[in-house]
Amino acid sequence: MNQEQFGGAIAQKLQEHKESLKAYWEQSGPVRHFFIDDLLPIEWAQACFDALPDPRKLMLRNTEKERKRVGIKLEDYNPLMKAILFSFQDKRVIDIVAEITGLEALEADESLYGSGISMMLKDDFLMPHLDNSHDGDGKKYRVINTLYYISPEWPENQGGNLELWNKPMTERLEIHSKFNRLAVMETHTESIHSVGKILYDGVRACISNYYFSAMPVNHKSYVHRTTFYARPEDGAVKRFKFQAEGMAKNFLSKFFDNKTTKTKHRR
């Protein structure tokens, strides 16, 4: 399999289900999204999982807000990783995602800012958060997140699933990180999402890409940094701490360019 074959297969699968996915997207919540199963032939999806790098060789992000491993050093990995990652940047794929979502002028990001390979092991997690509003140069809005899950037989009740929240954190929708499933979600000022703590002794692997646009989702200009939120069950101290940190970061972003050219999570 190569990038061209991956891209063609993904675009064809989305095209075949375009109308049903569009209808689902338009009524979905608390963050607009859609997902589709059996994205690729099963042997292709398995090959992608088998080609994953050793998680110990990836960047470990380990704070009270997240614990996961991310990788974008494609030259160090099996060539299949580059092929599957960049297949989601195929124009055919971007165009059909634009048709399904109705979002304008979607653009891929070759620098893989915030994207790439994500691998999570037992006890790893990602707290509820809003992604940084812009690309690495602070010029275009981050509007779409594509998440392709490639861990065979991932159990539904053992954590590691995508969680979508409403802004008051009173409603949560959980989407199983099922093998060979693609989830696509909108990103904007209220697209809070997270990954539940992993209870399973396995590797939860995801191939992710962001799409950007000169036009924000709601057609209103905004800037915000990556902002984390405590879970509803967390104590008042943690909720206040996260809230204060988020307010401070976003206040400062009004006075400083929202650029992330120095991050290690960008090629």
Image (cartoon, rainbow, N blue to C red):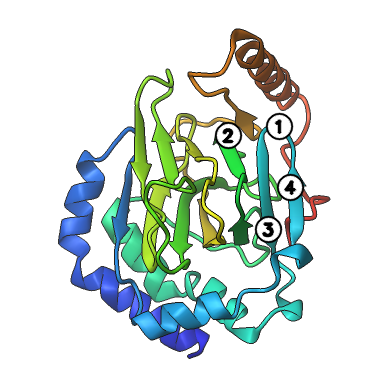
Residue 194 vs residue 102: left or right?
right
3D distance between C-alphas at marks 4 and 3: 8 Å
| Residue depicted at 62% across the width and 39% down the height | 132
Q: Position of residue 29 (x, y in %)?
A: 29, 36
Task: Check contact, mark 2 vs mark 3: CB within 8 A.
Answer: no
Horizontal and vertical percent for residue 70? Answer: 68, 58
**Label 2: which residue?**
127
- The residue under label 3 is which amino acid type? Val
Quadrant of residue 205 in the image? bottom right
- Mark 3, residue position: 70
Q: Which residue type does callout 1 highlight?
A: Glu
Q: Which residue is disc 1 drawn over?
A: 64
Comes first in the chain, label 1 or label 3:
1
Characterize the local packing of mark 4: few (<14), some (14-19) or many (20 or more) Cα atoms within 10 angstroms. Answer: some
Q: Is residue 118 left or right of residue 245?
A: left
- Of the two numbered discs 1 and 3 in the rendering, the one whose residue sits closer to the viewer: 1
Please, which residue is most extreme toward the bottom here? 1
Q: CA distance from mark 4 to mark 1?
A: 10 Å
Sequence order check, earlier mark of 2 and 3: 3
Q: Specify whether 194 is left or right of 10.
A: right
Residue 130 in sight in this render? no
In which quadrant of the rendered image does the C terminus lie?
Answer: bottom right
**What is the spatial separation of the Cα atoms under label 4 and label 2, in whole angstroms?**
12 Å
Snapshot quadrant of residue 15: bottom left
Give the residue type that dot 2 points to: Met
Q: Which residue is mark 4?
A: 61
